Amino acid sequence: MSTIAADPHPTPLPQAAEGASTSLPLPSGLRDAALAAPTPLVQAHDLAKTFDVSVPWLNRVLERRPRQLLQAVDGVSFTIEKGQTLALVGESGCGKSTVARLLVGLYHPTRGGFTFDGQDAHAAFRTSEGRKLRRRIQMIFQDPYASLNPRWKVADIVGEPLKEHGLITDAAELKDRVGELLKSVGLSPLDMVKYPHQFSGGQRQRISIARALATQPEFLVCDEPTSALDVSVQAQVLNIMKDLQRQHGLTYLFISHNLAVVRHVSDQVGVMYLGRLVEVAGKHQLFAQPRHPYTRMLLDAIPKMHDTGRARTPVQGEVPNPLNPPGGCAFNPRCPHANERCRVERPVLLELQGVRVACHAVEEGRI
Ligand SMILES: Nc1ncnc2c1ncn2[C@@H]1O[C@H](COP(=O)(O)OP(=O)(O)OP(=O)(O)O)[C@@H](O)[C@H]1O
Ligand code: SF4
Ligand SMILES: [Mg+2]
């Protein structure tokens, strides 16, 4: 479990540049926009995932307990242009990993879906087309210790997707390709005979990245890829990821609880709260002028690099129980601007001056 950015000794990270036809039924507004604008590579529409967390049936009957459904993700919509990075931030349990798992087909959505390069991805995941799509969409996980098989040599770990997808069958060619992949992430081809335990955490994450790149994917879903690493190593891995993005035109969904990392890697930032997006904005806009009270609270909690005299304000309050979310705006028990409307009416994401925000106070001009 992670909480939002509270690294007391942030390392300055080099600044980054700013940056369909679909078979899913799109609302007419979105359809018109899609016709006018170039098709984004990834277009999530009303993604939702509910988990049944009820106790076993017999206990429910004997103890007269109702079925319990947990709405992990509820109506998340976003687009990512080719070659761009959308970062998802939010406190632990807000649904970031569930979105990631929906995007790589590990979960099927309860509602909504997403298109990849104009293709309904979840429909494709269920057919033979899914194999092709899985080659184009890869995931990097948080923990390189858990995600690499300790009994396999690096050559087998990195070469496995190539064999699995039947991309390379010749042994010599496979060895050459694994060597190239290792070089592309700053490792040596000689490392292919070693086992994961012979590497540091940062090197292991490089091996994970090399493996993810093996099938020449276009879209990488990165779930806290540097959170388990030391701060100095984080910067190296992030820089490799950015170089690879430039070289291969990769598109990223990047999940992190560390806003300094988000600032370094993202073009767009989506802020999630209890399964929903509450603000989506360009990186510079979001950091310079956060609109949603929750985004402001998160940013106020970051130690300021050039403003050492200013005390940071820790994130206030607790995330509500997702099994019993508050009515109206889910943020209302923690929000200093909440009023009666906030307690009864759930705000929807509205576009205001190029930023999408779900907040009555912003909409009414109260803040
Ligand atoms: N397989 C599952 N079964 C039941 N509940 C789940 C499952 N996966 C996630 N959840 C619940 O869904 C909610 C969202 O979880 P998720 O892992 O997506 O959050 P997160 O934002 O990635 O959190 P963290 O920052 O801790 O990784 C949480 O309340 C979690 O307990
Ligand atoms: S809708 Fe109301 S409670 Fe929710 S963030 Fe805006 S002001 Fe706060
Ligand atoms: Mg997670």
Image: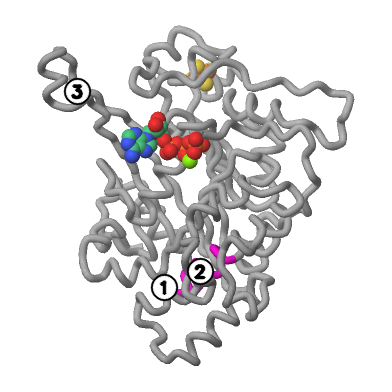
Q: If you read the primary sequence from the N terminus, does the residue marked by circle 3 or circle 1 appear first? A: 3
CA separation, marks 1 and 2? 7 Å
Residue stretch in magenta: 207-217
Q: Is residue 308 magenta?
A: no
Instruction: Inspect this view and state whether residue 351 appears.
Output: no
What residue did someone put label 2 on? 211
Query: Contact, CB < 8 Å: mark 2 with mark 3?
Result: no
Residue at disc 2, CB closer than 8 Å to ligand 3: no
Q: Considering only vertical position in the picture, is 224 above or below 294?
A: below
Instruction: Name the secondary structure under disc 3.
Output: loop
In the drawing, what numbered circle is on residue 67?
3
Q: Amino acid at mark 1?
A: Pro
**Between 59 and 292, the one nearer to me in the picture:** 59
Query: Contact, CB < 8 Å: mark 1 with mark 2?
Result: yes
Q: Is residue 171 left or right of residue 195?
A: left
Residue at left 31%, top 39%?
A: 49
Residue 216, image x and y in percent?
Answer: 48, 74
**Label 2 neighbour load within 10 Å: few <14, some 14-19, many 20+:** many
Q: Amino acid at mark 3?
A: Arg
